[in-house]
Image: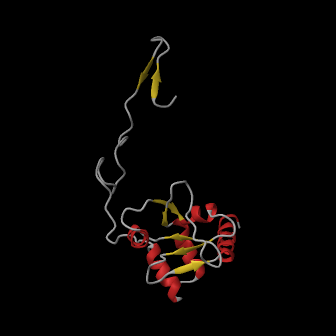
Amino acid sequence: MYGYEQHASAGHQQYGAPPPGYGQPPPGAPPHGAQPPQAHYPEPSPPSLADAVRGFATGALSPEDFQGIFHNARVYCPRGETPGFLALHNTQQPVIPMFTSLKELRAYAGKESRYFVITGAEVLDLLPTGYGFVLDMEGDHRVVFDAKAVEEMVDFAMHRMYG
C-alpha cells in the first residue's frame, strides 16, 4: 500500500515518512503564503455606458458593440410609488426614461428623486411590450430606442446567448 506500512502483528496502521520534497512548492514558485507577482499593466476596463451612448449617438460605435456594453451595464431608472418603470406617454410611442449614471438621473428628476438600478439585460427582459426607452434624456447625447428597436435588441441578445 502507498503512504503507510502495515504490520500484521501490530493490528494497526503506522504512517511512514513523506517522500522528500512533499508539501514544498515546486521550483520557481513563490514561497507558501507569498502573493504571485502582479501584472505590470492592468487589464483595460470596458467602456462605460455613458461612453457607449456617446459613441453610438455619434456613429463611432456599432449597434452590436453598443449592445455588448449595454447588456452588462448598470442602468438607473426613476421610480414611482409602485414598483416598475415610469413611462412617458406624451410621446408618439410610450418611452421609459433611463440613465447611464446617478448624476444624469438627478439632472432629469431632481436631487431627492427615487430610483432603482438594473442591468441592460434586465431592461430588455422586463420592459413591457410596445414600449421604448430613452437613455440620458437631458444629456448631450440622448439616444431613443423605440419599441421596434427594443424588439431588435431582444432578438440580437437572444441570438447571441442561444445561437
Quick one: 126 or 87, which is closer to the camera?
87
Residue 110, horizontal then vertical, whole percent:
39, 68
Position of 143 with respect to 149 (left or right) is left
Q: Is residue 87 above or below residue 143?
A: above
Taking the image as shown, residue 150 lies to the left or right of residue 136, namely right
Query: Can you tell which quarter of the image residue 103 is in?
Result: bottom left
Is residue 67 visible in the rendered image? The answer is yes
Look at the picture and state if 58 lies above or below 162.
below
Q: Is there any visible trace of residue 47 in the rendered image?
A: no
Numbered circles on residues, count:
0
Coloring basis for residues: secondary structure
Counting from the top left corner in percent of width and height, residue 20 is at 35, 40
Indicate the position of residue 33 as horizontal and vertical percent values: 29, 47
Q: Name the residue at the front extreme.
A: 90
Which image quarter is the C terminus in?
bottom right
Residue beneath the point at 56% across and 62% down: 85
| Residue in view at x 34 percent, y 44 percent | 24
**Residue 22 screen position, x and y as percent:** 37, 40
Residue closest to the eye, 147 or 80? 80
Q: Residue at x 45, y 24 (%)?
A: 5
